[in-house]
Image (cartoon, rainbow, N blue to C red):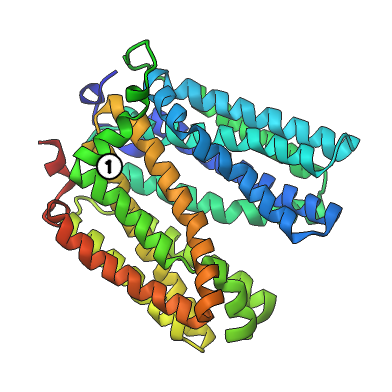
Amino acid sequence: MTETSIPEIPLLRNRDFLLFIVGRFSNVVGVQILTVAVGWYVYKLTGDPLDLGYIGLAQFIPALLFFLVAGYVSDKYDRRVILFCCNVGHLLVVLMLMLVFWGEYGGVRIILCILVLHGTARAFFHTAGQAILPNIVSTVTFPKAVAYSSSVNKAAQLIGPALGGGLIAWADDWTYIVTLLMFALSAISSIMISARLKLELPDKLTFETLLGGFNFIWQNKIVLGAISIDLMAVLLGGVMGLLPIYASDVLDVGADGLGVMRAMPGVGSLFMGVWLTQMAFPRFIGPCLFISLIVFGLSILVFSLSKIFWLSLVALLIYGAADMVSVYIRLTLVQLVTPDQMRGRVSAVNAVSINASNELGDFRAGLSAAVLGVVPAVLFGGIATLVITGLWMRCFPGIRRIDRFEELNK
């Protein structure tokens, strides 16, 4: 099936798109519940905060190790089958964790090994999930499909942890049953997508083929600019890792205030995503990308200097909304410009760039806070984001000149 053969169907009447959305939502909710449940169990077991760091590391390492392979597989094999297999992998992970938790067959090391399998399935799912969307919606409806997909993803990220916490508090063992049901629903939704999405790549796997995503990104300045600006902006401007210090020492709002602060970027992203789904034909795409990054940087500056709780919340709300605009434009640009036979490998590079920028961004923030102090570290991040945005506007004028997404298909 090629993109040109996809009929222009309204998104909410597109069966494959609705199945994709259901599969994505249920998968992300399942992942979020499982992450909360495992963290709670391990901390109760050991009482060591470092073990919580190992949980994140065990899920992140596979993304670094396997992203090239994940990209090749997504370009070689049927993407809906890849999504199905990843969810089956998640189901097996939950079953193994249930044996460990309920049967006490092993300790933290066994749990971390199982989570490596979980992280591997996530790496392949994320890559295939990005690459499949242009195969199931028309080019005209694709930008709006990205907005819907991003909004659903953000809603799942908000609902999942809350649901996980509630299940642990009130239902305990049912936490894992619900997680199994989420992954099963995602698996069924994925395999029910009617499009057959096997592509034609050379049968022989070569190093050059694996690196095809890097080569394409380097040669295409629009894709290079879109991916690299995300890496740099989030790496330099991330504030989420320092929120506990702000809640405790700067704003003095305690754990309850921290919970509200952590939720505000997600709320801002969700509302902006819903608004983007209602936009008919967005214009000034290139300028809007850079404007959203400028707003993103300014919100960091306001948050860094604020001593008023409500003003900090507004800054975090705008921070999340601006980030959603940037994500929406960047993902749409990358997927529309990339040929279908390259999307898996390009999506893999994009995915590991996003994950690395988030993880390394928190590390950068913590290191800067240790050297400069908390407020100067966040202030520096906001200024650096604005400087990087200005440099990228100058270095990638092709992005700045984009008016409509439709121009990318000419």
Q: Disc 1 designates what residue?
A: 334
Q: Residue 178, how many percent across, how many down?
A: 71, 40
Q: Number of numbered discs present?
A: 1
**Residue extending furthest toward the bottom:** 307
Residue 277 visible, this angle? no
* Element assignment for label 1: helix
Q: Quadrant of the C terminus?
A: top left
Q: Quadrant of residue 194?
A: top left
Q: Quadrant of the N terminus?
A: top left
The amino acid sitting under disc 1 is: Val
> Residue at position x 53%, y 66% from top?
240
The one nearer the camera, 246 or 7, is 246
The one nearer the camera, 164 or 218, is 218
Q: Residue 85, how many percent across, how many down?
A: 56, 23
> Residue at position x 75%, y 37% from top?
177
Q: Residue 130, how many percent across, how many down?
A: 39, 37
Would residue 268 appear left or right of 405 to someone viewing this image?
A: right
Residue 160 visible, this angle? yes
Count neighbours of disc 1 (C-alpha within 10 A) and say few if under 14, some if 14 to 19, many if 20 or more. many
